[in-house]
Image: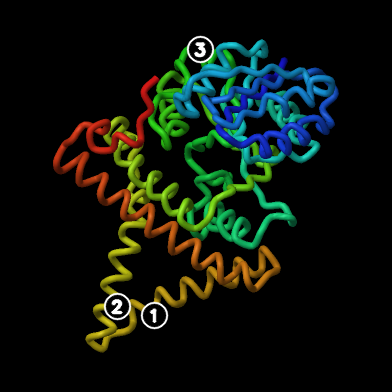
């Protein structure tokens, strides 16, 4: 089996340099291909790619900006491998990444897999706190790749593999962003393909974002979910409401506390105290424990409000998603 890495990028040549360096250090013995798709960047990475032409079997394409999903499709259409591995440009790979993927596929072949993400020691405290809030079982329930105890695992496109056959039959990613990865996963399920978490195929995901951009990102995640629920109602879950209900409970707790009934608010205090202890224990850093609380509050607020607004517009007002949230859709 021959692998092709598909990497879309937009205005981040420094990230590409780090990612390609980690790809050049893979312990995997056989040849593999790297396809870089520049998505209309004003600051391109062509010279960075040229630096690795002697170390990697690498090809570079420049195209007009049409979003990450379409850029991944563009790369897979031009790749020569029979199994594609999709990465975000802000990821770094441990040396054994591709060897772990290959070993897992040989043990139990699956047409689509996803891997988890971890934080390097060199990451900033904010990066580590955001990584914790996005991956911890206590915040996301493991849906981003931290738990094997999932009925159906939805791979995320920062670290995702898909066979050439599954890509061609499904048509690849749609034009919604974010949400293009669960959208593709559900369509693969409907075609009869299985998905699986490869716990050993992890990446180091930098997430080069500040608090404001983190809020914008998770708010868009929240807006995308009701759109996917409307498309695929059989896969809608009550747990998707959790961040919104968490916010409603927090407001209710404050109101009850003002009326002399602090018990509900006390439960929130216990939750965040537990979250702090788990973050400190896992990261061995008290500062990250406090930042993890802030990251979780931003995550729940951003996702919860986005979900509520989207649910109202999609299910109550019954607007078309492209009209309700044009910012979530790229025009290919």
Residue pointed to by mark 2: 254
Residue pointed to by mark 3: 168
Work out whether residue 179 or residue 266 is closer to the camera in this orientation and state it.
179
- Graded by Cα atoms within 10 Å as few (under 14), some (14 to 19) or many (20 or more), the crowding at tag 1 reads some
Give residue 266's mark: 1
Work out whether residue 260 or residue 74 is closer to the camera in this orientation and state it.
74
Residue 29 horizontal side relative to residue 154, left or right = right
Residue depicted at 51% across the width and 37% down the height: 153
Query: Residue 165: x percent and y percent?
Result: 55, 12
Residue depicted at 62% across the width and 67% down the height: 288
Query: Residue 275: x percent and y percent?
Result: 53, 68
Q: Secondary structure at mark 3?
A: helix
User: What residue occupies the far left of the structure in this picture?
Assistant: 317
Q: Residue 201, relative to residue 274: is it above or below?
A: above
Residue depicted at 28% across the width and 64% down the height: 248
Q: Secondary structure at mark 1?
A: helix
Q: Are marks 1 and 2 in contact (CB under 8 Å)?
A: no
Real-space Cα separation, disc 3 to disc 2, in angstroms: 52 Å
Q: Residue 34, relative to residue 137: is it above or below?
A: above
């Amino acid at each position: 089996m021959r692998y092709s890495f598909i990497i879309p990028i937009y205005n981040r040549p420094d990230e590409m340099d780090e990612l390609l360096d980690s790809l050049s250090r893979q312990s995997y013995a056989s040849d593999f291909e790297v396809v870089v798709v520049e998505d209309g960047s004003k600051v391109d990475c062509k010279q960075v790619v040229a630096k690795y032409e002697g170390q990697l079997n690498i090809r570079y394409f420049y195209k007009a900006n049409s979003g990450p999903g379409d850029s991944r499709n563009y790369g897979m259409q031009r790749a020569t491998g029979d199994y594609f591995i999709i990465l975000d440009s802000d990821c770094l790979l441990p040396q054994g990444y591709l060897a772990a993927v290959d070993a897992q596929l040989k043990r139990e072949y699956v047409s689509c897999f996803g891997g988890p993400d971890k934080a390097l020691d060199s990451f900033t405290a904010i990066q580590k706190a955001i990584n914790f809030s996005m991956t911890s079982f206590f915040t996301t329930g493991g849906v981003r790749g931290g738990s094997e105890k999932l009925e159906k695992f939805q791979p995320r496109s920062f670290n995702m593999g898909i066979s050439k056959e599954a890509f061609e039959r499904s048509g690849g990613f749609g034009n919604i962003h974010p949400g293009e990865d669960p959208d593709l996963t559900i369509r693969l399920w409907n075609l009869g393909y299985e998905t699986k978490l490869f716990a050993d195929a992890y990446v180091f995901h930098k997430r080069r974002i500040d608090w404001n951009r983190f809020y914008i990102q998770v708010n868009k995640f929240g807006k995308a979910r009701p759109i996917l629920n409307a498309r695929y109602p059989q896969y809608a879950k009550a747990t998707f409401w959790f961040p919104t209900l968490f916010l409603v409970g927090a407001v209710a707790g404050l109101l009850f506390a003002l009326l002399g009934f602090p018990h509900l608010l006390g439960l929130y205090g216990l939750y965040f105290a537990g979250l702090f202890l788990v973050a400190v224990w896992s990261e061995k850093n008290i500062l990250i424990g406090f930042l993890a609380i802030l990251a979780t509050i931003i995550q729940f607020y951003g996702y919860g409000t986005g979900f509520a607004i989207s649910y109202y517009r999609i299910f109550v007002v019954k607007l078309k998603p492209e009209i309700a949230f044009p910012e979530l859709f790229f025009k290919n």
